[in-house]
Image (spheres, grey):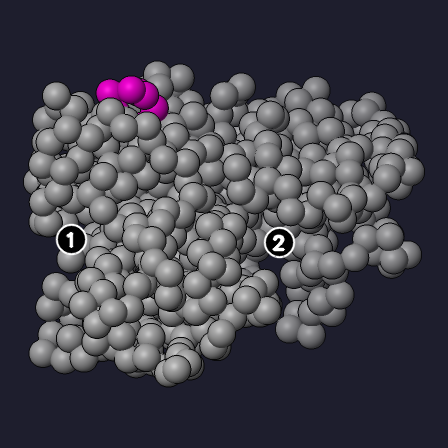
Amino acid sequence: MTATKLTMAQALNTALRDAMTADESVVVFGEDVGPLGGVFRVTDGLTETFGEQRCFDTPLAESGIAGLAIGMAMNGFRPVIEMQFDAFAYPAFEQITSHLAKMANRTRGRVRLPVVVRVPYAGGIGGVEHHCDSSEAYYAHTPGLTVVAPATNADAYGLLRAAIEHPDPVIFLEPKRHYFTREEVDTATPVPPIGQAVVRREGRDATLVAYGPSVPVALAAAELAATEGRDLGVVDLRSIVPFDEETVLAQVRRTGRAVVVAEAQGFASVASEIAARIGERCFHHLEAPVRRVTGFDIPYPPPKLERHHLPSPDRILDAVDALQWDET
Amino acid sequence: MTEDRLEADLAAMWRIRAFEEKLQALHKSGELIGSVHLCIGQEAAPVGACTELVDGDALFATYRGHGWALAKGTPTRELFAELLGRATGVNGGRGGSAYFSAPEYGFYGENSIVGAGASHAVGAALAGKHDGSGRIAMAVFGDGAMNQGAVGEAMNFAAAFDLPVLFVCENNRYSELTPINDMVRNDQLTERATALGIPATRIDGNDPARVRSTVAGYAAEARNGGGPAFVELITQRLVGHYIGDVQQYRTRAELEADGLVEPLAVATSALAGSGVDTDAIEGRARAEIEAAAEQALADPFADPDTAKEHLYA
């Protein structure tokens, strides 16, 4: 039996476990990830199973953690590091953008760094400012970083396996509000290649483009729209970088209308880049300008206000309504 | 100290000095462009320290790292080619003066972000502990890097994990353009290390033999599981922070005094009357460097069509 119901945290834990079993060079470290198993339990039991050389705690020093991973990767290891919370990764930003991202290109491939930076990512848990950030734009803007954001537990498993096997650095954004959501996961399913989007729902009238935690919201919006007679498709990017333009553009060309959904603030965002690409490449197929439904351009709000900030099915449907429908 | 050893050290120091002076000339003629940081005056540190590293060890330097790369065995022609933007450089001409690496020679790279390489060295040492290779790592940085959080983090990591990392601080008294002593309350930089439980020594960094023996002692301890160590080398830059820095912040008297204690002057004086022909040592170094530069200048430039290679698998 390889198919079983797992929470996303368990799916990620299983992926780490299977990767560590398959490849001795995989090591896991970060703050509180050792015997305790991490604040979200993603590394639960790994130290016990694999020993403290393979999964260990570090000082509270994110920059040092990322730098350590670089030095280990230069010498044959495949580190998987945890940043505990999205904004906690910012002290490591210098190491990630100036060194991790650039080494392979700068050395013409002589020094490659197979490091996975796991980031418990985005909001929806009633957290606070530094615990709920959507940080993907910073990474996606940096050449040399592959950026992955799973939306389902099956993808959490498969994409983490793919990220660990990847020869270059991967920023792995885990939608933390789904850590304890239970879904069917079949670990025998072939690992999906990084860089391939998936059509989660076919639809004739308009295409919703989303990734990570926004995918279930887009699917909920599509369900609601169906009850109102509108047939919306949903594309789950799975990888932000590389961006699977082909899949997105094929869907939008068929429907002629698109809404991009993301939690991050909208200005200069990944959602903006996707909207621009659609505008540039499918202009003559479009019936209406591409709309974006994103977080507002504010610091992440406190718990009592976050529901206003996060894209909701209602906000998505308002955007869909604005796509210049012919009322005849 | 034997005269043979000093003669070899002077030759090694002259190779670095000649390399750096050739870069000055190439910069003046417009062949070399961009930000270039020379180590003229600081040659004793790499020449003394690098002989204590063996195959498999990992050296991480700063943007003032040409001397360390040369002392570690990086070929002069490939190094010139790299700095001159040639496709034949150690990184195909894409790294340049402050960024290149050549791990095939144990030179794991310069770093243009002050202090950023220290934690890479800690990672290399941890890898050595886990893979059983017995590797030790050396992280070289300047006095200015002592005020970077990244160096503090790296030193504590190495201390907490008992890792074989030698932290080598080249104290040339200037943090880029500002005196280090204006930027600290306690000028005993070694006390930062001892506060973390890391043994530390401050020595004359202009004496390659002294550098060697000190590094040798700590390296032996590190290889035997003794953990990290910190060496502060007191030295001086005879040139600006970068080519073009006119050093308004230094007096003529100070520069003249530095010229009397700089390592090539000291070694040359020490060999006076020994029968060693120090002029010939200089001449051989300059001839090697001239030939390497000439070869590199004839090589093709990096191809812009390759700019997007090695970004995504």
Q: Residue at x 33, y 67 (%)?
A: A261
Q: Are marks 2 and 1 in contact (CB under 8 Å)?
A: no
Decide: is B275 above or below B45: above
Q: Residue A134: percent from the left, percent from the top?
A: 30, 64
Q: Residue A78: percent from the left, percent from the top?
A: 37, 31
Q: Residue at x 27, y 28 (%)?
A: A189
Viewed as shown, does residue A178 lie left or right of A229? left
Provide the chain ID for the residue under circle 2.
Answer: B
Viewed as shown, does residue A231 lie left or right of B140? left
Q: Which residues are magenta?
A: A20-26
Decide: is B221 above or below A38: above
Q: Residue at x 23, y 46 (%)?
A: A152
Residue type of the residue flagged with mark 2 = Gln
Mark whose residue sits in front, 2 or 1? 1
Decide: is A280 above or below A202: below
Say if residue B235 shows up in the picture: no
Q: Which residue is mark 2?
A: B236
Q: Nearer the viewer, residue B104 or B274?
A: B104
The mark found on residue A178 in the picture is 1
Asked whether B297 falls inside the magenta stretch, the response is no
Q: Circle 2 sits in a helix, a strand or a loop, which is it?
A: loop
Say which quadrant the N terminus of chain B sits in. Answer: top right
Q: Nearer the viewer, residue A217 or A317?
A: A317
- Quadrant of residue A38 in the image? top left
Q: Circle 1 sits in a helix, a strand or a loop, which is it?
A: helix
Residue type of the residue flagged with mark 1 = His
